Amino acid sequence: MGDELREGRLAAGLTQAALGSIVGLSHSEISRIERGVVLGVPYETLAIIASVLGMDLPLRGFPNGDRVRDAGQLALLARFRATLPRTLRHRTEVPLGMPGDQRAWDEVIDGPGWSIPVDAETRLRDTQALRRRVALKLRDSGADLMLLVVADTRHNRAVLRLAAEDFADAFPIAGHVALRALRQGQRPTASALVFA
């Protein structure tokens, strides 16, 4: 972070003293922040410095692989399973199978001679991150297709309308076509996004 703030300060044509004067810190404190020798700099201080330099300093949380399955996701998977024949087997939290990799498919459906991985999303947020995550899981698991089960909400449908073109490549067949194949005990021919 210090390097980025230093680059922003130099790009803005400010000295450490000038920046410190604007944000209410000494030039030596600015220097220590830029060099990363100050421990525990408050987020607010970093955000003020970044703002003065014309930079955004967003605060976001990112998944670390230790996610707890919540009641919403369990309910979503239960709704999805209820639409399928009982002859299909469902396994939950199926690891990708790579040593040391903590990622898992939310579910894997097993049919006669075939399997298909499933991921479930209760509320869509960052569709680009979702696409990357799913693409990496497909690649790393060796699966050639998957189902993305999304909660059927107004919000999720609006998000997917905005990202329709981007999602069309990743999920080339319609959800109802994939469901029809599954209900007939067959494996869908390509990845699909299914509302449940």
Image (cartoon, rainbow, N blue to C red):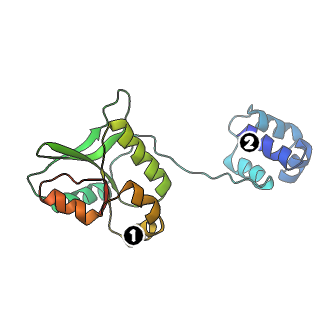
User: Mark 1: few, some, or many residues within 10 Å (few <14, many ≥20)?
Assistant: some
Residue shown at 71% from the left, 51% from the top: 47
Instruction: Report the number of numbered marks.
Output: 2
Q: Which mark is residue 48?
A: none
Given residues 175 and 25, the one toward you in this image is 175
Of marks 2 and 1, the one in the foreground: 1
Secondary element at image label 1: helix
Quarter of the image where one finds residue 97? top left
Secondary element at image label 2: helix
Q: Which residue is mark 2?
A: 4
Residue 26 on image: x %, y %: 87, 42
User: Mark 2: few, some, or many residues within 10 Å (few <14, many ≥20)?
Assistant: few
Q: Earlier in the sequence, mark 2 or mark 1?
A: 2
Given residues 102 and 29, the one toward you in this image is 102
Locate the C terminus by quadrant.
Answer: bottom left
Q: Which residue is mark 1?
A: 157
Residue 91 on image: x %, y %: 20, 44
Locate the N terminus by quadrant.
Answer: top right
Residue 179 on image: x %, y %: 21, 61
Given residues 77 and 174, the one toward you in this image is 174
